[in-house]
């Protein structure tokens, strides 16, 4: 049986992580997130884990080669498909990934990029109105507001905006996504391997659209 590989793309706040999770649950395909891979290797104290840990502790980016070795290792698991979430993020990582794919996958295996498309305006609306409490509870001023303005329903604590959700930081994260991430979408589009999904819909509807597209391509 040919394998299916789906690589999720989308700006911060697009909900692609949730969608990747839902797809993995339904299909049994293995989800590969480099963050999870690092955490597992570090916990198991493997050679790669120790190496990765050293970079992370110094606040540095783990070099592409180290990440690539981890990804390659995880693609050797038995599975009928794989889902990528959060990797690759730039041309360098895509190049590494394509080299690994060439080693592991066969011609008949299907590799697709899946874009959960959300406009900058919507990203700013979603992330910019997110508020947190020190107790861990997350609010959204439009979708899930606290009962008392600025205060946590559970513990009464003062709500705050996460640094990553401040307007300047959101604008920067979007800029990085457009600059580094979008050329990767072009690459898959040119190969006729890009599935574009409207991410400005309810979670269940986005999931349904994804399943319909994959089913249309006879991938599920
Ligand atoms: Zn609280």
Image (spheres, helix red, strand yellow):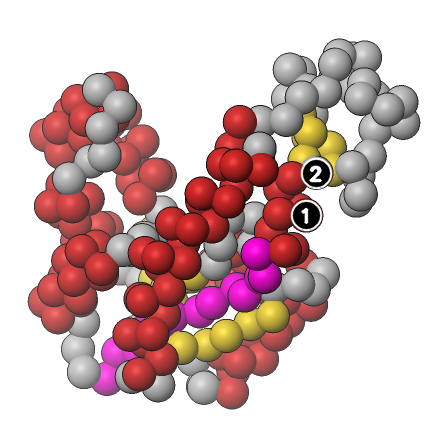
Q: Residue 84 colored magenta?
A: no
Residue 197 vs residue 71, the one in the foreground: 197
Q: Which residues are magenta?
A: 108-120
In the displayed structure image, the side of residue 22 where residue 81 appears, left or right: left
Q: Which mark is residue 69?
A: none
**Circle number at residue 125:** 1
State left or right for residue 30 relative to residue 100: right
- Could you tell me residue 30's position as x and y percent? 37, 56
**Above/below status of 12 relative to 134:** below
Q: Position of residue 4 (x, y in %)?
A: 34, 73
Q: CA distance from mark 2 to mark 1?
A: 6 Å
Mark 2 lies on a secondary structure that is: loop
Residue nearest the viewer, comparing 214 with 26: 214
Q: Is residue 183 left or right of residue 175?
A: left
Q: Main secondary structure of the magenta part?
A: strand
Q: Residues within 10 Å of mark 2 (few under 14, many from 20)?
A: some
Image-quadrant location for residue 45: top left
On the image, the x and y values in percent for residue 36 come to 35, 39
Q: Is residue 76 visible?
A: no
Q: Position of residue 115 (x, y in %)?
A: 47, 67
For residue 4, above or below residue 69? below
In percent of the image, x 63 and y 26: which residue is there? 161
Q: Secondary structure at mark 1?
A: helix
Rendered residue at 89%/22% (across/down): 148
Judge whether residue 109 is colored magenta. yes
């Amino acid at each position: 049986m040919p394998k299916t590989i789906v690589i999720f793309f989308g700006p911060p706040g697009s909900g692609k992580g949730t969608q990747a999770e839902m797809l993995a649950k339904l299909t049994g395909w293995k989800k590969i997130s480099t963050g999870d891979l690092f955490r597992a290797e570090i916990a198991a104290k493997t050679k790669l884990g120790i190496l990765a840990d050293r970079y992370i502790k110094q606040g540095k980016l783990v070099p592409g080669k180290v990440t690539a070795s981890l990804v390659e290792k995880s693609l050797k698991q038995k599975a009928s498909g794989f889902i990528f979430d959060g990797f690759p993020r730039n041309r360098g990582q895509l190049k590494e990934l394509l080299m690994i794919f060439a080693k592991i996958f066969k011609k008949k295996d299907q590799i697709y990029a899946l874009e959960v498309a959300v406009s900058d305006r919507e990203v700013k609306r979603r992330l910019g109105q997110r508020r947190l409490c020190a107790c861990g509870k997350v609010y959204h001023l439009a979708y899930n507001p606290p009962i008392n303005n600025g205060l946590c329903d559970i513990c009464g604590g003062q709500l705050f905006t996460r640094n990553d959700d401040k307007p300047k930081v959101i604008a920067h994260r979007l800029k990085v996504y457009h600059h580094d991430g979008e050329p990767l979408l072009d690459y898959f589009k040119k190969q006729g391997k890009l599935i574009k999904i409207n991410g400005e819909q309810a979670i269940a509807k986005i999931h349904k659209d994804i399943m319909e597209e994959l089913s249309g391509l006879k991938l599920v």
